[in-house]
Image (cartoon, rainbow, N blue to C red):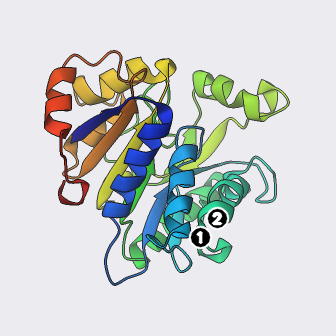
Amino acid sequence: MEIIVAPTPESAASVAAQAVLAGLPAGKDPVLGLATGSSPLGLYAELAAAVADGRADFSAAKGFALDEYVGLPATHPESYRQVLVREVCEVIGLPVDGLNVPDGTGATLAELEAGAAAYDAAIAAAGGIDVQILGIGANGHVGFNEPASSLSSRTRVKRLAARTRRDNARFFASESEVPTHCITQGLGTVMDARRLVLIATGEAKANAVGAAVEGPLSASCPASILQWHANAIVVLDEAAAASLQNREYYDDAARGLPLNAV
């Protein structure tokens, strides 16, 4: 795992985008794992800049969302399908028909579970994810893998933690409108990606980042699973890095780091 600390959120976005681009395969259309939330927005803007100047082309790419709410129709403005259409497809040029999102519209648990299994199968049929973009929740979740999630879990139905629902209430008229359940890629599904790029910015993420990077590998901090991946890159701004104890080493290790070789 490589930890790179950039001075500002904007420079962190630039470094994270470089890490994504360096992980894209040569000679084939890329398959991206897509995170929502505020942390990756700058990264997506940097990818759009790479498209504009000819360094990248996502016009034939496939994208797989990390998660989706249960109970929201696909047309709801806060469904993750619609969020990714706005924040990724329309920004980097990934075709909407290449965007895959877990199906949270099943009427029964059996239907939701069948849709979750089909989602893992669709990722496999696409050849697997080349680069999975990740954020981190204040409680250490990645995707919607809340604390106590199995470290080998697959795409499945999960109940959202109360803190996660409070954090996401800003996107809805009230907290009561935030769905209570989701379909999320499991940690085992995330770990199947060939490269992981996690971006975190802001003081509110510092404790979760410290637990994920320097704490024990534990279901109590789902993001700590990145310690077990052979090609994981964590990009932080100064505020998100504030609780790291081994910062001097990370800075030394990152000097001159060739991102296409990590």
Q: Is residue 243 above or below residue 54?
A: above
Q: Position of residue 117 (x, y in %)?
A: 49, 64
**Any mark on residue 89, and which?**
2
Q: Which residue is mark 1?
A: 94
User: Can you tell which quarter of the image residue 128 is in?
Assistant: bottom left
Q: Is residue 53 above or below residue 3?
A: below
Q: Residues within 10 Å of mark 2 (few under 14, many from 20)?
A: many
For residue 203, say whether it is visible: yes
Q: Is residue 101 above or below residue 43?
A: below
Residue at coordinates 76% horizontally, 59% vertically from top-left?
Answer: 74
Q: Position of residue 254 (x, y in %)?
A: 20, 39
Q: Secondary structure at mark 1?
A: loop
Q: CA distance from mark 2 to mark 1?
A: 5 Å
Q: 70 or 169: nearer the eye?
A: 169
Q: 178 or 4: nearer the eye?
A: 4
Residue at coordinates 47% horizontally, 30% vertically from top-left?
Answer: 201
Q: Secondary structure at mark 2?
A: helix
Residue type at tag 1: Leu
**Disc 2 + disc 1, Cβ < 8 Å:** yes
Residue type at tag 2: Cys
Is residue 155 left or right of 5 when viewed as pictured? right
